[in-house]
Amino acid sequence: METLNSVLLRSRRRWEFPRLQLRKDLVRGSISVLAGLAIWEILTRLLLENELLIPPPSSVARSFWKLTVSGELNKHLGATLLEFAYGFSTACIVGVILGYLMGMYKWFDEIMDPWIATLYSIPIIAIVPLIIIWFGIGMVSKVIVVFKITAVAIILNTAAGIKNLDPVWLELAKSLRLSGWETTYKIRVPGAIPYIITGMRLGVGRALLGVIVAELMAANAGLGYLLRDSSETWDSPKLFVTVLLLAAMGLISFNLIKRFERRIAPWRQSAEWSTE
Amino acid sequence: MVHRVASSESPCFSIDERTGKLFSTLLKAGSLAAGLLIWHFLAVYAINDATLLVSPVVVVQTAYEMLFVNGELYPHLFASSWIFFYGFALAIVVGVPLGFVMALSPLVRDYVNPWMTTLYTTPRIAFAPVLLLWFGIGGGAKVAIVFLGCVFPILINSYFGMRAVNRDYVELARSFRLRPWALFLKILLPASVPFILAGIRLAIGRGLTGVAIAEWFGATEGLGYLVFFAGQTLNVPTLFVGVAAFAVLGILGFELVRRVEAYVTPWRKEPQGG
């Protein structure tokens, strides 16, 4: 616990530092966004008489309001979030356990490796039809899609974290005469946490894509369903509302995890976010 | 990636290196064989329903037929490859310079950043219907979807590559009075090549996913089309062949770029990312 606490303390101190510096980017960023929206609105009003291709922001906002009031948005958003939550939480538990075993026992690693590598290299989209054949068009198939995507990322990273543990910490455990179980949950697992979080971050983006794809293919609720519904009925404002919502979901989850990661593992470089 | 690098570092106790390697290969092969056997028996005896699961033997047979007997796979493979290469090439052509410009000018970076981050974090599938609306169901929309998938890892890695250039090299260039253009060609560009290659490697997987997404919307050929059509007609053997083709392409592309990386940047032992 000692190590984790000191890590948290350190991170808190470092975190406040860049905040003041960010101001200038934020100002420029918001100018850029506002200008973009204004140009979009003006151009669509002036040039297009048909809203089909690009609806102006104002009619997207109106459509958003209508969907919210009718409760339709709530239903779809809720379905997607629930599927995501179920799959993600199961994947965290299973992934950490399997990853731990793979990191600890070489033979288990050898046995799992070819299968994990195969699962990892198949594009998620390609196996969604198979999962739908097996588990139906209901919620279960989406939960499985999220689970598969996230679990692989977490397993790989947890195993790496357990293997790359600083040997000094293990020495410490030995000299403190910790039992095997204590070594696991006081030294090994906390030591692997930064890796585990990285796995979660990698999983989130892909899992979001996976759940939307699965809903697009066959579902009766969820944002993917809304996307399909609005594109098939040529309801462009509604389509744009869905796209913007998905963008917001992606941005929020990405930033939350990044912040969380920086808090828990401040020594990791931010160049990491290049890895999807 | 992380995983493979790590496993080569972990020590092998008491057994000497060669026996250890043999043992590990045996275990891996054994695991694969056992898995395939279980799959076979599950398919043949437990489930026994060709619309749910078929034996790996049937899958291999189908693959053989599609590859060597009737050659059904090739038009799909060909169509997908074209889309992939156009999108990928466009992503490199746009991503690398834009990444460089963003790294060299904070002004451009700050103005472009919010748009880029939003585009990057949105699940790409969301753009597919919109792009389809704009470009129609021809090649344009498909290439655009692949492009959107590939461009960000390349752009971001070019950006970080340029930012991470060792200051000493730049100082050196200054003291030799290199012109800005020469500084760029001789110092900045070579120093960021490893990062760009890492970005390209990451982009391969995302590009393949992009191909699958693109071909799902209104395509008549391509690997993605093959997989979805097979899924809708419950043709499980073909479905497996399509999925396997995607996996093989992904592994091949990844390995290819890794070779190029090892060749172009021999001084780097451990590539970034993964």
Image (tube, helix red, strand yellow):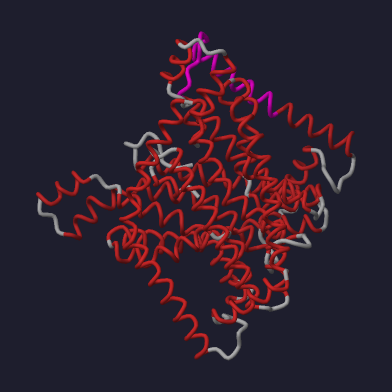
User: Residue A180 in the image: x percent, y percent?
Assistant: 57, 15
User: Residue A97 in the image: x percent, y percent?
Assistant: 63, 29
| Magenta stretch: dominant secondary structure | helix
Which quadrant of the structure image shows residue B146?
bottom right
User: Residue B214 in the image: x percent, y percent?
Assistant: 62, 63
Nearest the viewer among B96 and B122 is B122
Q: Which residues are magenta?
A: B9-32
Q: Is B161 placed above or below A166 here?
A: below
Q: Residue at x 38, y 66 (%)?
A: A29
Q: Is B237 placed above or below B9 here?
A: below
Nearest the viewer among A165 and A183 is A183
Q: Is A144 placed above or below A107 here?
A: below
Nearest the viewer among A228 and A85 is A85
Nearest the viewer among B236 and B172 is B172
Instruction: State left or right for residue A185 relative to residue A12.
Output: right
Instruction: State left or right for residue A10 relative to residue B204.
Output: left
User: Residue B147 in the image: x percent, y percent?
Assistant: 51, 62
Q: Residue at x 45, y 53 (%)?
A: B153
Q: Is residue A186 magenta?
A: no
Q: Residue at x 41, y 60 (%)?
A: B95
Q: How many labels, in total? A: 0
Instruction: State left or right for residue B176 relative to residue A265.
Output: left
